[in-house]
Amino acid sequence: MITRRKLLAALAPAPPQLNYILVLADDMGYGDVGPHTPHLNRLAADGVRLKDHYSCSPVCSPARAGLMTGLVPDRVGITGVLREQHDAHHGLALGAKTMADHFRARGVKTALLGKWHLGMSAPYHPNRRGFDYFWGFLNGMHDYRTNLSAGGGGKGTRQTHENETPVEIKGYFPELLTRKAVEFVEQHRNQPYFLYLAHPLPHAPLQAPPGFASQEPRDVYGAMLSALDETIGAVRSALERTGQWDRTVMVFLSDNGWVKKVSLDQAPLGSNGPFRGGKYELFEGGIRSPCIVRWPGLSRPGTIAKTPTWFADWVPTFTGVKTRDGRDIREVIAGRKGDEKRLLAWRFEDALVKTPLTFAARQGKWKRLNDDVYDLAADPGEQHPIRSRRLEKELNAWKAQLAEPA
């Protein structure tokens, strides 16, 4: 039982001795936490699951922009996924401070391992956006065997870097990433750090680890989920082995749901749980994220929180820095009910995959998606739209202020 005194103490400014590890999966569906993820299941048993946690977008780049800045992605120049045409001159708004900037201002070591996808030219590079150390790739989609870009910037070219230096790497990328993460944790055991572990799995291409025999797409997808899960297990083991586990906050998220449109042959592979839609859509299947939090002294083992929260909340929750669109959600993590009247809202369109301009808002159990309203308590799968003006005024007000300075 967490007493009021303990809760208030826990909600005080986060002590600098804590480490923070933020793991972000890529395109992993809400329902993909299960048989292939024993380490994630164990993490959930040791912490809290935020069952109504949302991404800021149903696609990669805007989701990451919201996560890194605590702001709706439209405010920081990322309104859609960054593709080939954005290679040279587009990225996260240069005036926007990132979570890493805030940590570094406190003297905390910062590192990004894995995927960036918020700008490929020099001004947008992770080392210039608050990260002391970067190892990974700048673009959106990676060939895990050749380690060349498979799309989302510089297709067919090498986009792997260590800090600002291009590097050639050999081997199955997820396994190399796991080794890098374990190495970082072991080498920095004596100083506080923020590690953003931006894992590229289970995003396409479908490539299982070396030695995996089956070529069946469903088996390969399962093997990729297992490889992602192995990273979680290896990092946890390193933390326990070096005495850091009880002073390390670990959060697991996925940037958006598994794709259910565009690649129809791959649609059945991933699971968005009971939710409709997926990547590229503002239905729950596109934006509801699996969220597991283990926070020493704050979260309680095996608990579930149902207050709606989202990616923009992690900047104020981790760093104490207030943002326009984020809130400190430590009280939710601790098991207290959060603000049920809070409005979360989204804007999205994608001409390439034919997603029309769409707006959505959630408040309490109600969700508005363009002109349809859903009672998510009774209809989580969004199968029975209600014709109503509920949340119309609130969503219109949100649209009107999108262009205002952050």
Image (tube, rainbow, N blue to C red):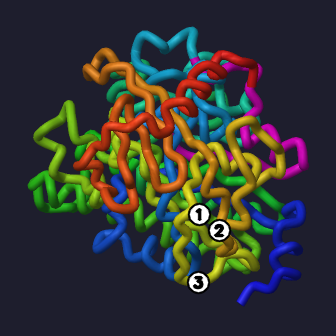
Please tell me whether mark 1 or mark 2 is closer to you in this view: 2
Q: Quadrant of the C terminus?
A: top right
Residue 2 location (% of width, % of height): 75, 85
Q: Residues within 10 Å of mark 2 (few under 14, many from 20)?
A: some
Q: Nearer the viewer, residue 301 or 237?
A: 301
In this orientation, does residue 168 appear?
no
* 118 is higher (above) or lower (below) than 317: above
Residue topped by disc 3 = 301
Spatial CA span between label 2 and label 3:
17 Å
Callout 2: SS = loop
Residue 182: image tag: 1
What's the residue at 41%, 66% (across, down)? 229
Q: Residue 85 location in percent, x, y? A: 42, 10
Q: Which residue is mark 2?
A: 337
Category of crowding for the residue at label 1, using alpha-carbon neighbours closer than 10 angstroms: few (below 14), some (14–19), many (at least 20): some
Which residue is outermost to the front?
Answer: 388
Instruction: Give the left or right position of residue 13, taking residue 249 as reference.
Output: right
Magenta span covers which residues? Answer: 91-115
Q: How many marks?
A: 3
247 left or right of 277 in image: right
Determine contact: label 1, label 3, CB under 8 Å: no
Q: Residue at x 72, y 67 (%)?
A: 331
Q: Residue at x 32, y 71 (%)?
A: 34
Residue 198, magenta (yes or no): no
Q: CA distance from mark 1 to mark 2?
A: 35 Å
Q: Amino acid at mark 1?
A: Val
Give whichever of 178, 18 is nearer the camera.
Answer: 18
Q: Position of residue 322 (x, y in %)?
A: 81, 43
